[in-house]
Image (spheres, grey):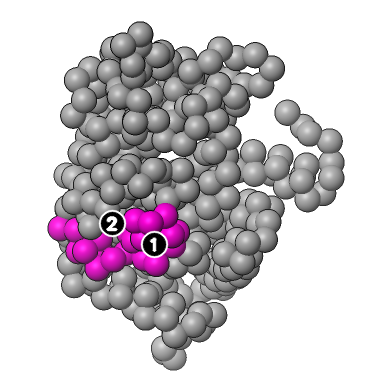
Amino acid sequence: MREYTPLPFDQSEEQADLRSMVRSIVEQIATPQRLSDFDEREAFDEELYSALAESGLVQLEGDVDGTPSSHESQTIVLEELGATATSIAVSFVVQYMAVTLLSQHGTPAQRERYLAPLFEGAHRAAFALTEPGGGTDVARAMKTRASRRPEGGWVLNGAKMWISGATDCGFLVVLARTTPIEKSAVGGITMFLVPAATPGITVNEMDTVAIHGLSTCEVGFADVVLDDDAVLGDVDRGFRQLIATLNGERLNAAAVALGIARGAHHASLDYVRGREAFGRPIGGFQILQHRLVDEAVKIEAARGLLQRAARQADGGAAAETLSAMAKLAASDAATTATENGMRALGGSGLSREYPMQRYWRDARLYTFAPLTDEMMHNFIAEHHLALPRSY
């Protein structure tokens, strides 16, 4: 049987070296058995994360002076991690969000305190936005409050939900309402940098079906006292500042989903080449071939959109519509490749011996994160097709 050769990547020599570095680190540390073990134990792979961070993969081209790393570099790292260590990839999405916010809005003192150790891998960030009573409409539903203290500083009260990596982070970026809703729900919200060891914080890990190698948590804040220098950016403008970073988060979500699709696709190919039925490899059956071809087309289409969106964003041009399209395309590629993979493996797909069931579970995250696929459709319809707002 002729050997399968993946299509070449459209990338510079430096980008090829970056992709090769990520693959090399993962191959050296995260064997398939190790990935399975950490998923089964629902444990974070500190050794793998540290090796990646110490190699400069959190920092990339960024610096503590506020220089950001490129979108394209981030998406290369995340695609490679998504194809293998998906939970670590999700953690990196959170770290890149924290890096972006600190680079854009942090004071020199805040960047030195939080960004420098983030680059080094000495600690990690958690991002606390979503609340028990709010999902897509999180700003209007936000009940977490931060009030000024007469003697200076702030006191924080409230609860957040679905917070990734809060059990072992060094600090949290927390959004809280600081002014009551008046004309706009997005106004009156402030971002705070909150050390995880601050008294009054409680963290409870949730039992989730996927992303087992990274904790998903409920976080409570009970009279948490913060200094004035805990404010990240401008008071009452935190949500607007966050919205300005969502394009990058969509790109990064698309990159992880693309990686999951690629990992599942290659796992399917390996299986159908080796599994026999009716005296021949099942990869010779037309229905399986058609499904694998559909996956390959969706993966390459998603990569094309992702690269185009990332390069446009790096060039300073508006890329919101392209990033929304990339996120939709990558989410579709991931769910298609993992669904087809489970069907190709048959009973073996239900076995935890094979990674397909992990890819299948983990892919579902990106049908609703960071925004649902339905909201991506709404955004594209309104902003690209010039149709009336549907919600």
* Relative depth, front residue between 260 and 99: 99
Between 306 and 263, the residue placed more toward the observer is 306
Q: Is residue 198 visible?
A: yes
Tell me: 197 left or right of 176.
left
Q: Mark 2 points at which residue?
A: 119
Question: Where does the image place residue 280, in percent across and percent down from the top left?
Answer: 41, 79
Q: What residue lies at 44% left-to-right and 22% top-to-bottom?
A: 176
234 vs 222: above or below: below
Magenta stretch mostly in which secondary structure? loop
* In the image, farthest residue toward the top: 150
Task: Look at the image and say whether residue 67 sits in the magenta stretch.
Answer: yes
Location of residue 313 (image quadrant): bottom right
- Magenta-highlighted residues: 47-69
User: What is the three-letter code of the residue carrying label 1?
Assistant: Gly
* Residue 157 seen from this side: no
Looking at the rendered structure, the secondary structure element under dot 1 is loop
Q: Where is residue 268 in the image (x, y as percent from the top left)?
A: 41, 67
Label 1: which residue?
A: 62
Secondary structure under the numbered disc 2 in the rendered image? helix
Q: Is residue 346 left or right of residue 313?
A: left
Residue at left 15%, top 58%? 47
| Crowdedness near tag 2: few (<14), some (14–19) or many (≥20) residues, C-alpha within 10 Å | many
Quadrant containing the C terminus in the rendered view: top right
The reply to whether callout 2 and callout 1 are in contact (CB within 8 Å) is yes
Q: Residue 95 carries which label?
A: none
> Amino acid under label 2?
Phe
- The N terminus: image quadrant: bottom left
- The mark tally for this picture is 2
| Other residues around mark 1 within 10 Å, as few (<14) / some (14–19) / many (≥20) | some
Identify the residue at horizontal 52%, vertical 38% (top origin).
Answer: 242
Task: Report the residue at 26% width, 44% height from top.
Answer: 113
Q: In this view of the protein, which residue sits in the foreground, 104 or 50?
A: 104
